[in-house]
Image (tube, grey):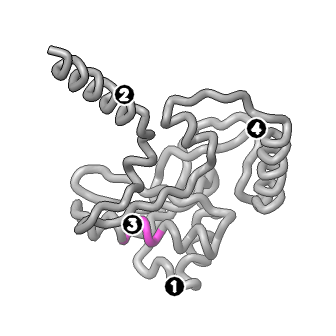
Amino acid sequence: MNKLTHIFIFLLFACTVSAQTKFIDRLTRVVAGQGRVTVNQDKRLTDLINGETSQPSAEANNKVEKDKEEEEDETPALVTPTGKKTKVRGYRVQIYWGGSNRTDQARAQRAANQVATLFPQYKAYTSFESPHWRCRVGDFTDRHDAVEALRQLKKAGIASEAMIVRSEVFIYK
């Protein structure tokens, strides 16, 4: 009976110790014959995932504020509109229209990324309306502005078969 009690206590202790293993630790441990996972994230996020709560220090708060200021300095003024966002009827330039498979989705996203890189002043919208993936660019209330954007996109070689479409667009008041 005494031996059974010792085994029970040992198993209880082993379960308690294994329950203390953190999620990220289990995720990143090395197991022979399997791949390796590396997690790069803020310590606060790791603490949150592991269920640990800690009060942020003043030093950590200052670092977060400094990081936010640096991000704001790098953001171009053209990309960050101000005011209240309103949806109105307008125009967009459709630069990609494809099928419904993953390849078409990737092509639509690639077109959006090209626009974001070469023309940061235009917002690109990738969407799926069954059965087609499409990528549309801009929020134009005036057709003349959409025609000018279409001309620029064609000149850059992004949209050889692009066209202007009526769409609901966002304006900032």
Q: Quadrant of the C terminus?
A: top right
Q: Which mark is residue 16?
A: 2
Horizontal and vertical percent for residue 99? Answer: 24, 64
Q: Amino acid at mark 3?
A: Ala
Q: CA distance from mark 3 to mark 4?
A: 29 Å
1 or 62: which is nearer to us?
1
Is 149 placed left or right of 158 in the picture? Answer: right
Please give the residue where the numbered disc 1 appears in the rendered image: 157
Residue at 53% x, 60% y: name it. Answer: 124
Q: Nearer the viewer, mark 4 or mark 2?
A: 2
Seen at 41% across and 55% down, the residue is: 28
Q: Cα distance, mark 3 to mark 2? A: 50 Å
Mark 4–mark 2 Cα distance, whole angstroms, equals 54 Å
Identify the mark nearer the N-term, 3 or 2. 2
Quarter occupied by the N terminus: top left
Residue denoted by label 4: 83
The residue sitting at 62% across, 76% down in the picture is 118
Q: Looking at the image, which is closer to me, 149 or 129? A: 129
**Disc 1/disc 3 C-alpha distance (Å):** 15 Å
Q: Which region of the structure is painted magenta?
A: 107-111
Q: Quadrant of residue 110?
A: bottom left
Mark 4, Cα crowd under 10 Å, few <14 / some 14-19 / many 20+, is few
**Mark 3 falls on what kind of element?**
helix
Residue 23 within the segment the image draws in magenta: no
Instruction: Tell me what residue is drawn at x 43 percent, y 57 percent.
Output: 126
Question: Which one is closest to the eye, mark 3 or mark 2?
Answer: 2
Sequence-first tag of 1 and 3: 3
Q: CA distance from mark 1 to mark 2?
A: 62 Å
